[in-house]
Image (tube, coloured by chain):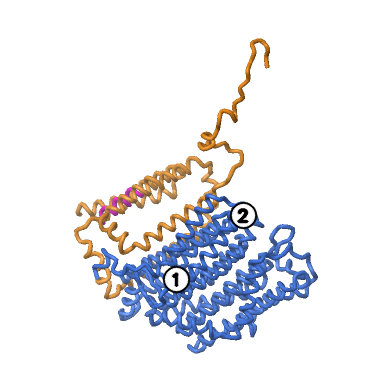
Chain colours: A orange, B blue
């Protein structure tokens, strides 16, 4: 076996096992940690495929942001996950059945797979333009040329997501004290201070 | 060929001007809203209506010749132009209906019109998609804004539930769609509509691969048009969402999704007409029957409209089954008439308020003929039209799709369509009976706001006047449909 094959089986094996642990671990914190392990191994698989950019993105975005966010949520919210999981067992037969149907469909598909004759042309077109370029460079070229429209539209989606999140969660709370710099600057001594002349011993 | 991956060969943003304008307009409105606060909501709503009208003018000013730009990502032709005008009309109607409702329900927030306009941008992208990637981002832009709108009344449990339900099922449908697209990519090696169409045409026989892909893609889109068996979310979401949002859901997104489905089936999947014909046949038949029989037992007018819209999508799909330019034209006319009728019906539903709260039961309409005869007669005309009784517009919509189906020999489908439309007539007529012959309930609150009266008047007038010159709309729809076939 070549080094690559060994690496593939190592990554794939650990990935599958840790994915299994994500859904079976009793402690949700352990689940999230296994999820991070799964992401790392998936990144390894991408490196094996020569897709180093996606591998790095997976580590930075999924491990660095998403999984850590999960960890925060799991630790900060007081949710009893064992209660949530109660009754999940009754859906196992149905889930198993659906999984089986999908698996057999995939098997059927794999057995009868015939690609169109043009596939080599269609696939070769983008590849030849990027021969000898790194992943990042090719992606950069594509995003701002060929996929310009989709890229801009993805930006709009993020914009809507941001507006939506604010709409659904932002509440105006009355009586919250906030610092307003402009107000502080506008304050004049004569508005808030009163200067009294005091004669000794007389009181006010 | 290889060149197009590093440079844009056809950099021409002119056909994109309406979308760019709309997106910038929405952002501008957001800035105004943030600085002026929620009291500016009604102003922003009317400004968005004006913005949508300007967008419609921009579309009319474009060159409607078939044009593919930005390396095949975006297409503008007569079909896209016509459908975009329909979408804009629907958005304007639903926004005009919402203004007073938002204030009455105390959910007057300036993000509402911004989200509506952004979902409109998504719909326009869907209608002009010429690449699976454009299709998907357009669809997600539209859906994401609609998920938020469904949950807009966030303090009402029903609304939050509707938003969540819509979101989960929408995510599921996106998953199916993407799975289908990935299978198709595996089969043809491309996500460009033109390349997919050419590859499928050149293939000697259609193997399992693209059929699987087709099934998953159509299933994903069937969720969006709520065709049976992917309709389960519709009644719950329609009932739970704020009524102005329900009006939006019933009027607009289905037009966009239907347009997308038509482009997809008639252009890249043209070579697989035999395969998708069967799928759409089933969807159409099942939707008509479920729409007709499911609506009978409903007590809530919103759920009734949900079943009615399921049934109506079934009728519209008949035109796609026919698979001819005539059928496609009939679908466009059907969608236009359906949209206008639904807008009118919602003008009435939104006025159903007693003691400052919205009421939604059909029984609440009792005695409307005494307390507000104009509204009752207008509603009766719209419902007669929905039931497909001549000489209202709804009749012509139905007869056009049935004609197209019969011309291609789909007799069974047409007969069952007529049967289910008779069954559905029962529940429309029941509403009319409640309005005119049942013991009067208390009248509804206050005067009907101007916008609702205007929408009701326009839609009733359209439904009545359609018979005078049907060729006006039918011919432009036919020519728009032709551009799909011989672009």
Query: Element type at marker 1?
Result: helix
Q: Where the N terminus of chain B falls, by quadrant?
A: bottom left
Q: Quadrant of residue B383?
A: bottom right
Q: How far apart are the two marked residues, 2 and 1, measured between alpha carbons?
A: 31 Å
| For marks 2 and 1 on the same chain, the one whose residue lies earlier in the sequence | 2
**First to last magenta residue range:** A39-49
Dot 1: within a 10 Å radius of its alpha carbon, few (fewer than 14), some, or many (20 or more) residues?
many
x then y, percent, for residue B373 = 75, 73
* Quarter-of-image position of residue B212: bottom left
Left or right: B96 with respect to B171? right
The residue tagged 1 is B127
Q: Which mark is residue B247?
A: none
> Is the residue marked by circle 2 packed among few (<14), some (14-19), or many (20+) residues within 10 Å?
some
Residue A20 appears left or right of B89: left
Q: Image point 55% across, 31% down: which residue?
A: A188
* Residue B487 point in image, percent of width and height: 38, 80
In percent of width and height, residue A45 lies at 29, 53
- Does residue B173 appear to the left or right of B191 in the view shown? right
Secondary structure at badge 2 equals: loop
Q: Mark 1 lies on which chain?
A: B
Considering only vertical position in the picture, is B223 above or below A32?
A: below
Taking the spot 38% from the left edge, 49% from the top edge, the residue there is: A62
Q: Quadrant of residue B340?
A: bottom right
What percent of the width, then of the height, locates residue B179? 40, 65
- Which residue is label 2 attached to? B107
Q: Is residue A64 above or below residue B393?
A: above
The front one of A19 and B75 is B75
Q: Tell me the residue at 54%/67% (across/down).
A: B91
Residue A58 seen from this side:
yes
- Nearest the camera: B306 or B373? B373
Nearest the viewer among B218 and B320 is B320
**Marks 2/1 same chain:** yes
């Amino acid at each position: 076996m070549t080094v690559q094959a060994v690496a593939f089986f190592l990554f794939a094996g650990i990935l599958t096992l840790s994915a299994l642990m994500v859904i079976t671990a009793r402690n949700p914190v352990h689940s999230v940690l296994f999820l991070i392990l799964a992401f790392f191994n998936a990144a390894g698989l991408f490196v094996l495929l020569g897709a180093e950019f996606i591998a790095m993105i997976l580590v930075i975005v999924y491990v660095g942001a998403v999984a850590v966010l999960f960890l925060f949520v799991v630790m900060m919210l007081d949710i009893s996950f064992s209660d949530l999981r109660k009754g999940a067992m009754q859906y196992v037969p149905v889930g198993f059945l659906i999984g089986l149907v999908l698996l057999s469909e995939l098997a059927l598909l794999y057995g009868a797979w015939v690609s169109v004759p043009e596939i080599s042309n269609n696939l070769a077109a983008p590849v030849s333009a990027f021969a000898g370029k790194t992943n990042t460079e090719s992606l950069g070229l594509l995003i701002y040329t060929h996929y310009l429209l989709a890229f801009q539209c993805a930006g709009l989606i993020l914009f809507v997501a941001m507006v939506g999140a604010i709409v659904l969660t932002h509440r105006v709370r009355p009586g919250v004290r906030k610092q307003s710099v402009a107000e502080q600057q506008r304050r004049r001594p004569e508005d808030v201070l009163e200067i009294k002349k005091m004669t000794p011993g007389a009181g006010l | 060929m290889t060149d197009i991956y590093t440079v844009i060969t056809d950099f021409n943003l002119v056909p994109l001007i309406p979308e760019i304008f709309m997106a910038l307009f929405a952002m501008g409105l957001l800035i105004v809203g943030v600085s002026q606060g929620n009291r500016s909501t009604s102003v922003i709503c009317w400004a968005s209506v004006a913005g949508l009208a300007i967008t419609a003018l921009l579309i009319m000013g474009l060159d409607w010749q078939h044009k593919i730009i930005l390396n095949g990502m975006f297409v503008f032709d007569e079909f896209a132009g016509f459908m975009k005008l329909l979408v804009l009309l629907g958005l304007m109607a639903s926004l005009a209906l919402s203004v007073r409702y938002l204030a009455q329900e105390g959910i007057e927030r300036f993000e509402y019109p911004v989200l509506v306009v952004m979902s409109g941008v998504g719909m326009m992208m869907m209608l002009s998609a010429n690449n699976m990637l454009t299709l998907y981002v357009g669809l997600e832009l539209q859906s994401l804004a609609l998920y938020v709108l469904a949950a807009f009344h966030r303090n009402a449990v029903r609304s939050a539930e509707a938003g969540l339900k819509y979101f989960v099922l929408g995510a599921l449908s996106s998953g199916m769609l993407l799975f289908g697209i990935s299978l198709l990519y595996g089969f043809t090696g491309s996500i460009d509509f033109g390349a997919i169409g050419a590859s499928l045409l050149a293939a000697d026989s259609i193997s399992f691969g693209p059929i699987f892909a087709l099934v998953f893609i159509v299933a994903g889109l069937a969720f969006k048009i709520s065709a049976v068996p992917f309709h389960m979310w519709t009644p719950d979401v329609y009932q739970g969402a704020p009524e102005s949002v329900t009006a939006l859901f019933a009027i607009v997104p289905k037009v966009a999704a239907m347009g997308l489905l038509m482009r997809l089936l008639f252009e890249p999947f043209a070579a697989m007409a035999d395969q998708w014909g069967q799928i759409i046949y089933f969807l159409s038949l099942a939707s008509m029957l479920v729409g007709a029989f499911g609506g009978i037992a409903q007590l809530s007018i919103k759920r009734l409209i949900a079943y009615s819209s399921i049934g109506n999508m079934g009728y519209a799909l008949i035109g796609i089954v026919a698979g001819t330019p005539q059928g496609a034209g009939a679908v466009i006319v059907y969608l236009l008439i359906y949209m206008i009728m639904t807008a009118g019906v919602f003008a009435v539903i939104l006025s159903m308020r007693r003691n400052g709260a919205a009421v939604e039961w059909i029984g609440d309409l009792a005695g409307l003929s005494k307390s507000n005869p104009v509204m009752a007669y207008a509603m009766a005309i719209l419902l007669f039209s929905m039931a497909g009784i001549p000489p209202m517009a709804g009749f012509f919509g139905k007869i056009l799709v049935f004609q197209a189906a019969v011309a291609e020999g789909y007799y069974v489908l047409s007969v069952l369509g007529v049967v289910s439309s008779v069954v559905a007539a029962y529940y429309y007529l029941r509403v009319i009976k409640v309005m005119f012959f049942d013991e009067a309930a208390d009248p509804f609150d206050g005067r009907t706001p101007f916008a609702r009266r205007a929408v009701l008047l326009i839609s009733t007038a359209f439904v009545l006047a359609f018979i005078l010159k049907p060729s006006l709309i039918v011919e432009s729809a036919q020519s728009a449909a032709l551009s799909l076939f011989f672009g």
